[in-house]
Image (cartoon, helix red, strand yellow):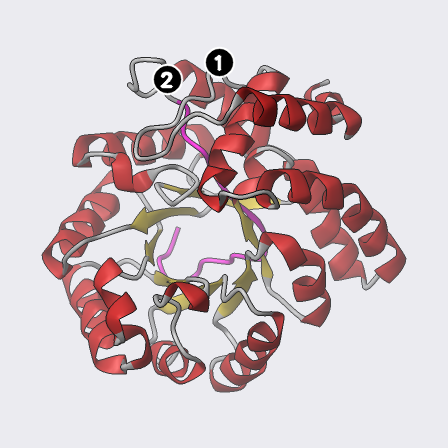
Amino acid sequence: MPKHDISLDGVTVATVLPFKSDLSIDWASYDRLLAYCTTPRGINAVFVNGHAGEGATLDARERIEVIRRTRAFIGPDKPLLTGIIPYSTADAVAQAKDAEQAGADVAVLFPMPQFAAGASGDPRYVLHYLETILEATTLPVSIFQQDVRSGTGFSTAVLSELVKYDRVIAIKEGSGDIQLYEDNLRTLKALAPDVAILPSNYHWLFAQVALGADGILSGMASMIPHLLCELWAATQAGDLKAMRAVNDRLYPIVRTIYGPPPLIDMHTRLKAGLAHLGVIDDATPRPPLLPVPADTARQVALTVDRANLKAALA
């Protein structure tokens, strides 16, 4: 597809990546996962090699293979986004070049850990990062906005500078503050109406889409793609009653996956749910992530059963 004609309306699924007990990638489970979470009507894009996909634990060969296999499965018409999770600008360039050659449509730029020391409020650092990627590839770019409490989430002023670039086509909005989300939404849409704002704060997706959004981007879509597609369809229809009804179904799932500490387990809990559903064989993550305790796995399974998620497999 033309690189500057990419629509991210609808739901973008951020895929988890299943591993075997020896921590190698379980490609058979990944194929089943793709069949489960990328095919429901309303899933309009796929995001790989992000936090949900444990992209920081993958080597270059593995990241490339994830992109190639995903592209082969979803075909040429559905946008394929890939995470760039670097520890240096040179690392980011290498990842972006690999992604472009492997068939990705959009590079999703994650903030570097060093940005937590104040760079997230100083545009020089992220602009240099962005400009270097734009010079090295022809890929459009999405900005991965982190929770501002982490120190790596960008200020509204910095985001306002980023959206001025022609090839910045989206902001994955995970600021972690609903007031800040609205401030960013209003400010960025006034500056760059064509830049997609994609809410991803699991605890208040309902509130975010009610305020305004161009789509949803979430790792939850790996496990509950149909529910997020229903939420987005109701949003597009302006049907507040239907939106609330979907949110009522989402609430216990969201609180089980994202509510209890430690939050670092969130994507492993999604894997536990997918393993309980039989979509993947094993919920094992790669270190530094660790398997969830047995009682957590039981609670996830109970929540999955109460939500009747197995009906989506029929």
The residue that disc 1 covers is 281
Q: Residue at x 39, y 44 (%)?
A: 51
- Magenta segment: 1-18
In the structure shown, which secondary structural element does the residue marked by tag 2 occupy?
loop
Nearer to me, 292 or 98: 292
Relative to residue 8, is residue 17 depicted above or below? Answer: above
Relative to residue 277, is residue 182 depicted above or below? Answer: below
Bin the neighbour count of mark 2 within 10 Å (Cα to Cα): few under 14, some 14-19, many 20 and up.
Answer: some
- Give me the disc on residue 26: 2
Q: Earlier in the sequence, mark 2 or mark 1?
A: 2
Q: Is residue 2 visible?
A: yes
Q: Is residue 12 magenta?
A: yes
Bin the neighbour count of mark 1 within 10 Å (Cα to Cα): few under 14, some 14-19, many 20 and up.
Answer: many
In the structure shown, which secondary structural element does the residue marked by tag 1 occupy?
loop
**Residue contact between numbered discs 2 and 1, judged by CB atoms under 8 Å:** yes
Q: Is residue 41 visible?
A: no
Task: Provide the major secondary structure of the magenta segment.
Answer: loop
Residue 54, x across and y down, in percent: 35, 37
Nearer to me, 130 or 120: 120
Q: Amino acid at mark 2?
A: Asp
Q: Amino acid at mark 1?
A: Asp
